Image (cartoon, grey):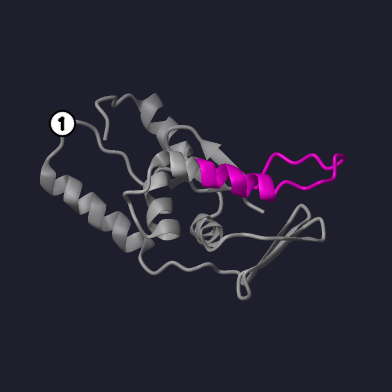
Amino acid sequence: MSGNYTTESIVKTRTLGTNDYITKPFEPIEFMARVESVTRRVAGRKIKLATLTSNGILFCFDRNHGTVDSQNIDLHLTEWDAMKALLVDPGVVVECSILKEHAWGNAKVTDAAVHMATRQLRQKLKPDSSELEHKGLIRAHRGIGYSISNY
């Protein structure tokens, strides 16, 4: 929700991957209808792939096994769950609150804990090859959350 209702601000937030945008003042019934609409859209979404391969990274979600540059990586269950949450819609920003629910099962986890865990996950996914230009599979969107690049 925002008091900023300029076309530029709406377009900017939509290009960052928001599902909706509502300006103040708003009617509570409209707000609830929009929440229900987004909930219907995302309910029951599942990862479409059992494996993911991108820039030397291989994930097998059926077995919770991954490699980076052919080297096994050890991910915690929370990190696997975070990856799955990010892969529901590659390229779309996943808010920290959603990551908290999916990876920790608890919305009371601090944002700092999410940022630290995501930083560790990003570090684990970084290829060793110095020749490979790698911007990162997981991208941070300051003040919003994270996205996984379209592989």
Question: Does 94 appear in magenta?
Answer: no
Callout 1: helix, strand or loop?
A: loop
Q: Position of residue 103 (x, y in %)?
A: 45, 58
Q: Position of residue 30 (x, y in %)?
A: 16, 46
Q: Which residue is mark 1?
A: 25
Q: Quadrant of residue 139?
A: top right
Near-viewer residue (42 or 122) = 122
Question: Does 125 appear in magenta?
Answer: yes
Q: Is residue 149 visible?
A: no
**How many numbered markers are drawn?**
1
Q: Please name the residue shown 68% across and 50% down the image.
A: 124
The N terminus - image quarter: top left
Is residue 74 placed above or below 2 in the rendered structure?
A: below
Dot 1 crowding, Cα within 10 Å, few <14, some 14–19, many 20+: few
Q: Please name the residue shown 12% across and 48% down the image.
A: 29
Q: Position of residue 110 (x, y in %)?
A: 38, 43
Q: Amino acid at mark 1?
A: Pro
Q: Decide if residue 18 is on the left or right side of residue 149.
A: left
Q: Which residues are magenta?
A: 116-137
